[in-house]
């Protein structure tokens, strides 16, 4: 329960999800955030490719962006459908294509991106883990932009809180809640980017950067899940606190630790 003494309540900005509307054409903020993520990631990747020892060129970066964009969109949507709301989409299959309303899963997008980079690695005759190491530091800008899109859409809000920065979201009742989208923006966007960008500034063993990405994202997401409201149709899976996000994220941390241990054992400093 929120303390009765809590009088002043912040309200999440009531922003129209449609940024631009021209006749039947509607451009949603959520879509704009994806464009920002892809373009920002592309520019950062070009910067990384400009380093003398990168071994990448501009055309390869552009080609890789196309692979990743397809993997993120298809994987993210299918992941949300399968992991979070399969019964609904079985009854309403056309809703699968309404991506502008939200409903993208990071874990699905992650798997889609991994597959896309594997295809790119085969085509470009590169080691798959070398590709993931190169991409990992620039992914955070897309994650951060996506969380801002969630905030603008006022979706994926947090649990009820009496903290002074709790916010009232239009479809979540009149009790202030954790702005968990902003927590994720700071952790998965800003902090993750800084950690990986600085860590990858020096040569690292193959798979180490990818492993650190999995660890950091997994830990950040796992922590935020404690204050994030679970999907109403799923709820808690166990013990009154375990969410689908916990279940999907914990293996990422274990895999990341295993990758870093393997990377440094194979290539000791």
Image: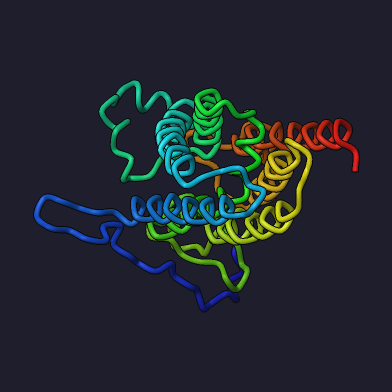
Q: Position of residue 269 (x, y in %)?
A: 90, 43
Q: Quadrant of residue 3?
A: bottom right
Would residue 87 be found to the left or right of residue 185 on screen? left
Which residue is outermost to the left? 23
Would residue 246 be found to the left or right of residue 37 on screen? right
* Between 207 and 180, the one nearer to me in the picture: 207
Q: Position of residue 134 (x, y in %)?
A: 62, 43
Give me the residue at 71% from left, 58% from top.
Answer: 198
Q: Is residue 146 above or below residue 78?
A: below
How is the model colour-coded?
Answer: rainbow
Give me the residue at 57% from left, 71% from top.
Answer: 165
Would residue 70 be found to the left or right of residue 127 on screen? left
Q: Is residue 120 above or below residue 72?
A: above
Which residue is outermost to the bottom? 8
* Between 242 and 162, the one nearer to me in the picture: 242
Give me the residue at 53% from left, 26% from top.
Answer: 115
Instruction: Say how many tags the image has.
Output: 0
Q: Which corner quadrant holds the N terminus?
A: bottom right
Q: Position of residue 22 (x, y in %)?
A: 13, 58
* Between 54 and 150, the one nearer to me in the picture: 54
Give me the residue at 56% from left, 50% from top.
Answer: 49
């Amino acid at each position: 329960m929120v303390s009765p003494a809590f009088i002043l309540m912040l309200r999440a900005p009531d922003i129209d999800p449609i940024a631009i509307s021209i006749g039947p054409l509607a451009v949603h903020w959520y879509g704009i955030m994806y464009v920002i993520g892809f373009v920002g990631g592309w520019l950062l990747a070009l910067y990384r490719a400009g380093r003398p020892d990168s071994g990448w060129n501009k055309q390869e970066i552009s080609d890789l962006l196309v692979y990743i964009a397809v993997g993120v969109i298809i994987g993210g949507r299918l992941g949300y459908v399968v992991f979070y709301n399969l019964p609904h989409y079985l009854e309403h299959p056309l809703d699968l294509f309404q991506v502008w309303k939200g409903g993208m899963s990071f874990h699905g997008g992650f798997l889609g991106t991994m597959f896309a980079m594997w295809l790119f690695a085969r085509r470009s005759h590169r080691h798959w883990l070398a590709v993931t190491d190169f991409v990992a530091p620039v992914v955070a800008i897309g994650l951060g932009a996506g969380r801002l899109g969630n905030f603008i859409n006022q979706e994926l809000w947090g649990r009820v809180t009496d903290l002074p920065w709790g916010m009232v979201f239009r479809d979540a009742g009149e009790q202030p809640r954790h702005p968990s989208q902003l927590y994720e923006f700071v952790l998965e966007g800003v902090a993750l980017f800084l950690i990986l960008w600085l860590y990858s500034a020096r040569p690292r063993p193959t798979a180490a950067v990818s492993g650190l990405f999995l660890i950091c994202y997994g830990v950040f997401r796992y922590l935020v899940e404690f204050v994030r409201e679970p999907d109403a149709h799923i709820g808690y899976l166990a013990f009154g606190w375990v969410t689908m996000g916990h279940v999907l994220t914990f293996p990422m941390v274990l895999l990341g630790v295993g990758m870093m241990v393997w990377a440094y054992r194979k290539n000791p400093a």
